[in-house]
């Protein structure tokens, strides 16, 4: 009960709340005025789902690409696994330098919440001669 009271107090000052579905909107009703609750669906509507044939064409095109894209899209904190993805990028870089064809391209997008994580990331990229072109947000 104390947690709910604290949440109500803290959230009463927010400009708006974002609910990830209409069914979750009631979670905010007593905390934020209803006109300040925005629903942004966290999913894919049936209108955006391709037909079976469109899906197969897209899948075939992507599977036939010689270079696959790896997109890390999350907070850049160790528990999310970005360091493992960096290690794979370093292995791919080593393969390319040894004369093999590129098979993977890596992009990272997310926020750092700790300066030490940003320092690790930038240091690793520099030491392994990786080229990271994506925009990194945060800190």
Image (cartoon, grey):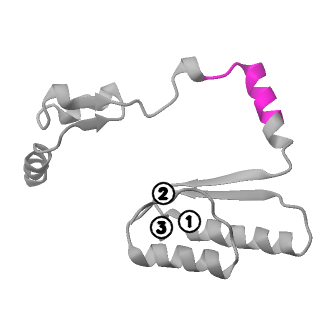
Marks 1,2: beta carbons within 8 A: yes
In the picture, the disc for residue 79 is: 3
- Residue pointed to by mark 2: 110
- In magenta, the rendered stretch is 49-60
Camera-near label (3 vs 1) is: 1
Camera-near label (3 vs 2) is: 2
**Left or right relative to 56: residue 113:** left
Camera-near label (1 vs 2) is: 2
Secondary structure beneath dot 3 equals helix
**Left or right relative to 25: residue 118:** right
In the picture, the disc for residue 82 is: 1
Separation of marks 3 and 2 at Cα, in angstroms? 13 Å
Q: Is 53 inside the magenta-drawn segment?
A: yes
Q: Where, quadrant-wise, is the C terminus in this rendering?
A: bottom left
Secondary structure beneath dot 1 equals helix
Q: Residues within 10 Å of mark 3 (few under 14, many from 20)?
A: few
């Amino acid at each position: 009960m104390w947690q709910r009271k604290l949440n109500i107090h803290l959230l009463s000052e927010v400009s708006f709340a974002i609910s990830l579905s209409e069914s979750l909107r009631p979670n905010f009703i007593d905390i934020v005025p209803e006109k300040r609750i925005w629903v942004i669906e966290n999913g894919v509507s049936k209108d955006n789902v391709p037909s079976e044939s469109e899906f197969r064409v897209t899948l075939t095109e992507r599977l036939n690409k010689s270079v696959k894209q790896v997109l890390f899209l999350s907070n850049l904190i160790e528990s999310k696994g970005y360091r493992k993805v960096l290690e794979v990028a370093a292995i791919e870089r080593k393969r390319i330098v040894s004369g093999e064809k590129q098979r993977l391209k890596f992009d990272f997008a997310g926020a750092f919440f700790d300066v030490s994580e940003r320092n690790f990331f930038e240091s690793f990229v520099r030491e392994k001669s990786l080229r990271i072109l994506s925009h990194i947000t945060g800190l």
